Amino acid sequence: MLKQVKDLQEIFSKNAELAARLKLAEEHAQRLQEQNHTLQALQPENQRLSERVSLLEEEVRWFKEQFFGRSSQKSGAELSSEQKMLFNEAEVLAAIEAADAAHAARTATIAAHARKAHTGGREPIPPHLPRKDILHDLPNAQKYCEHEGVCWAMKRIGEEVSERYHYEGPKVWVERHIRPQYAPECCHQGVHIAAPPAHILPKTNASASLLAYLITSKFVDGLPIYRVCRQLERQEVRLSPGTAGSWVNAIGEKVLPLINLLHEELLTYPLVQMDETYLQVVRSEKAPSSDHYMVVRAAGPPGRRIVLFNYEASRTAQALQNLLVGPEGAYRGKLLTDGLELYDTVTANLKLIHLGCLQHCRSYFHKAAKVTELPSGRNLARVALDDYIRQVYLVERQIKALREEYENRGETLPLEIVLKLRQEKSAPVMAAFKQWVDELLPGVPPKSALGKALSYTASQWTKLTRFLEHPDAAVDNNYLENQIRPFAIGRRSWLFAETQQGARASANLYSLVRCAEVNGLEPYAYLLHLLEEFPKASTTEAIEALLPWNVKPLLKAQRAAA
């Protein structure tokens, strides 16, 4: 009996142990299930953070490329020898010049006999520059020769001439405008005096030449006004930056009628290019650190090109649209821009044909090729750049060469030839590019550099391919970007505009100097003529005579006469 009781106690003890173990197993299974649920819940967050890390690493690589890499978008195979040896520029140029000189010194065979080439390797000095002869003659005692006891005078048989550039610093002198006064001796009918000469700023002591120099220094050479005043101070010209700045701003306001004529002329052309860049204005309704904008437009054929800068406090669709409205109504042509969505609104409101910029598409893929971590992603970006976009630009290069060939003959390249080349060569490339983008787009993270490039291409595709149907349009907005570059370079020096009024005046003056340069005029010469003649222009026809293409023949004749 006692044994049976012990057996029962042992069984109960084992069952309790099993129950405890079972309870522990159940608790452990429950914890595992909770951890699995937690792990599954954290997987999307982990994927998001991993993608975030990848994107941030791409941005870091891109910033490093911006600071330390080269800015050119050419591949390594396309680099010129000058770019590869950029830091050895002086040595490379000296070696090139020495090689040219050695080549020129070699004998050249001419009509069955050889003789030395007399021209040096360097480029000749332009013939239109004035010359001043400086004679280096023998002393009189060395101009005689003793021969057989007789002193013979030497005969001049020729001369050796070498030319060098001479630089003479700017000169400042004072114009004294004297107006004699006359009064009759027989009566008291008052004093008679000649009318004062017309001057754009009559109550200042600045001549047109000084004003043209100030404007050219800032808006062409990118020098701040205070630095120009310091240069003048070395010649004992006492001119404060505040006074000089007020003069420049006043000129910018007075030339507004000429700017209005350029605006009206621009809206008559079938294609307008448009872009914008930021500007800081210290005193305005916005915070001093806020961005204001210079909106830039370009249009016109060679010889009548127009580039206009307009200051806008805010970049809105209405502000951009107002720039495409003139006295005759809204613009009704083609607009070439980048991918800014505001331009979609503008073109929809004005019913314009909207063309896109292939260069911006190229820049997206160029960034992806630099910063994408996986080699496969970089290779895909290179495929877009080399197999598709580059092929389109090769066709454009051929069109450019043809256009220059026709211009050299005094003719204009027919648009039918441009249209035919683009349809035959560029259209198949763009069609293959679109198919490649559509196949690749679903499998690439949309926020990655490659994903952004593909998304931009797909969303802008209709605008990117319109150049195939419009031979008068470019494939990109590079021309306008090049017109903005002098402004961006100057902005690094003068940094900001003090007031909105100054920003508007600066926009007008930038427009004038850029219009002068793109039409082949030297900016200072054009501004000097403009500032001298503008106060005399009292009619619209007189102001039209001051447009760059109307002034060019006169300035060319003056230069030839000088």
Image: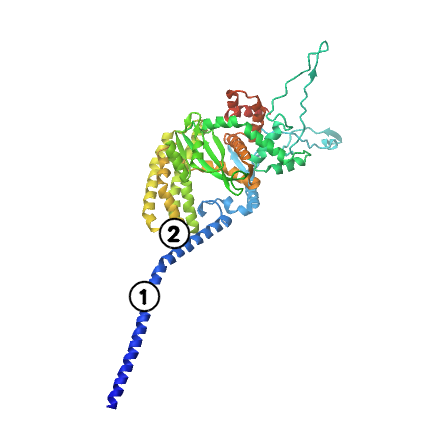
Q: Is residue 131 above or below residue 542?
A: below
Q: Which disc, if any, is residue 377? A: 2
From the image, tell me which residue sits under label 1.
33
Per the rendering, the mark at residue 353 is none
- Left or right of residue 551, residue 231 in this image: right
First-in-chain label (2 vs 1): 1
Q: CA distance from mark 2 to mark 1?
A: 39 Å
In percent of width and height, residue 50 lies at 40, 57
Identify which residue is drawn at 32% across, 44% down: 435
Q: Could you say which is closer to the camera, residue 331 or residue 102?
A: 331
From the top left corner, tell me how far across and down residue 42 is, in percent. Answer: 37, 60
- Mark 2 or mark 1, whichever is nearer to me: 1
| Amino acid type for the residue under numbered disc 1 | Gln
The residue closer to the viewer here, 144 or 265, is 265
The relative height of residue 258 versus residue 482 in the rendered view (above or below) is above
Name which residue type carries label 2: Gly
Residue 122 sits in which quadrant? Answer: top right
- In the displayed structure, would residue 562 be above or below residue 71? above
Q: Position of residue 220 (x, y in %)?
A: 55, 35
Asked which quadrant contains residue 506, the reply is: top right
Q: In this view of the protein, which residue sits in the foreground, 470 or 409? A: 470
Direction from residue 16 to residue 399 in the image, left or right = right
- View extreme (right): residue: 149
Mark 1 element type: helix
